[in-house]
Image (cartoon, rainbow, N blue to C red):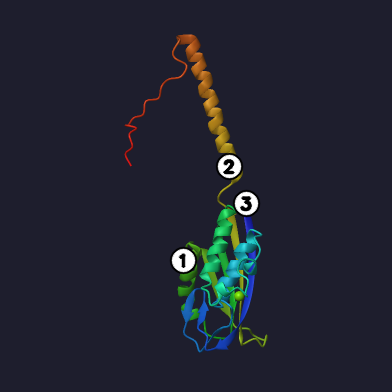
């Protein structure tokens, strides 16, 4: 199996008066995560992990922080671009594992809803997504949310497979040509039998 691994990490500081969004969910909390976009630390980490897995750069390559188009942007946009990049490279997601590190709010009561949301955004099954959360013990970083994400990809479209399939089709055509030649020599049947379509060829659209 042709696989690729990707790792992403992100951090955002908490800021009063900003809506809190993590894993595509809006959370009820007095502070949100400051950022040029919606500050969704988890989606940013997954986006970087996906891009890293296919060596396609990072989130800042595609969405520079100073670009006014991405001011307060929904981070699902970034994730979608990363999904397009891995699909273009011929890969699909095997699984995603994330560790959120933040003092508050508690993630465990909403962890299953967050997993479902992330699985939806990634178009994968629930059991392909893991989201863990822990507090930043001993780091003195209670005002910051961090996220680590690891993704495993597998190749789902192989250009070499397509080449070998066309080679098989070509060899079948060559074989048919040989058979036709033999039939012509032995029985004198026409070299090319006319193929009559089983249905009318008039425009039926
Ligand atoms: Mg970020």
* In the foreground, 53 or 85: 85
Task: Determine which residue is flagged by label 1.
Answer: 120
Which quadrant is the C terminus positioned in? top left
Q: Is residue 50 visible?
A: yes
Q: Quadrant of residue 174?
A: top right
Q: Quadrant of ligand 1?
A: bottom right
Are the residues flagged by discs 2 and 3 in contact, CB closer than 8 Å? no
Q: Residue at x 51, y 69 (%)?
A: 76
Tally of marks: 3
Query: How dense is the environment of label 3, judged by Cα within 10 Å: few (below 14), some, or many (20 and up)?
Result: few
Q: Furthest residue to the front?
A: 68
Dot 1 or dot 3: first in sequence order is 3
Between the C-alphas of marks 1 and 3, the distance is 25 Å
Residue at image mark 2: 161
The picture places residue 116, in percent across and down from the top left corner, at 46, 69
Considering only vertical position in the picture, is 109 above or below 98? below
Q: Residue at x 62, y 55 (%)?
A: 3
Q: Could you give the CA–CA distance between mark 1 and mark 2, rounded to whole angstroms? A: 30 Å
Query: Residue at 65% across / 63% down in the picture?
Result: 52
Mark in front: 1 vs 3: 1
Provide the residue designation for mark 3: 2
Q: Nearer the viewer, mark 2 or mark 3?
A: 2
* Circle 2 SS class: helix
> Alpha carbon of mark 2 to alpha carbon of mark 3: how far?
13 Å
Q: Disc 1 or 2, which lies upstream in sequence?
A: 1
Q: Position of residue 53 (x, y in %)?
A: 63, 60
């Amino acid at each position: 199996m042709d696989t690729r691994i990707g790792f992403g990490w992100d951090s955002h500081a908490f800021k009063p008066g900003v809506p809190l969004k993590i894993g595509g969910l809006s959370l009820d909390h007095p502070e949100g995560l400051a950022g040029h976009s919606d500050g969704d630390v988890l989606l940013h980490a997954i986006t970087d992990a996906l891009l890293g897995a296919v060596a396609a750069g990072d989130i800042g390559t595609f969405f520079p922080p100073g670009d006014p188009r991405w001011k307060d942007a929904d981070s699902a946009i970034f994730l979608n671009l990363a999904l397009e990049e891995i699909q273009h490279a011929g890969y699909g997601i095997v699984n995603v594992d994330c560790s959120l590190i933040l003092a508050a709010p508690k993630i465990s009561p909403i962890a299953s809803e967050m997993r479902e949301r992330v699985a939806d955004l990634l178009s994968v099954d629930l059991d392909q997504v893991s989201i863990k959360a822990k507090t930043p013990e001993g780091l003195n970083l209670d005002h910051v949310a961090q996220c680590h994400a690891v993704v495993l990809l597998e190749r789902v479209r192989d250009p070499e497979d397509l080449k070998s399939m066309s080679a098989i089709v070509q060899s079948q055509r060559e074989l048919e040509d040989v058979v036709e030649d033999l039939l012509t020599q032995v029985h004198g049947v026409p070299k090319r039998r006319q193929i009559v379509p089983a249905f009318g060829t008039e425009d039926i659209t």
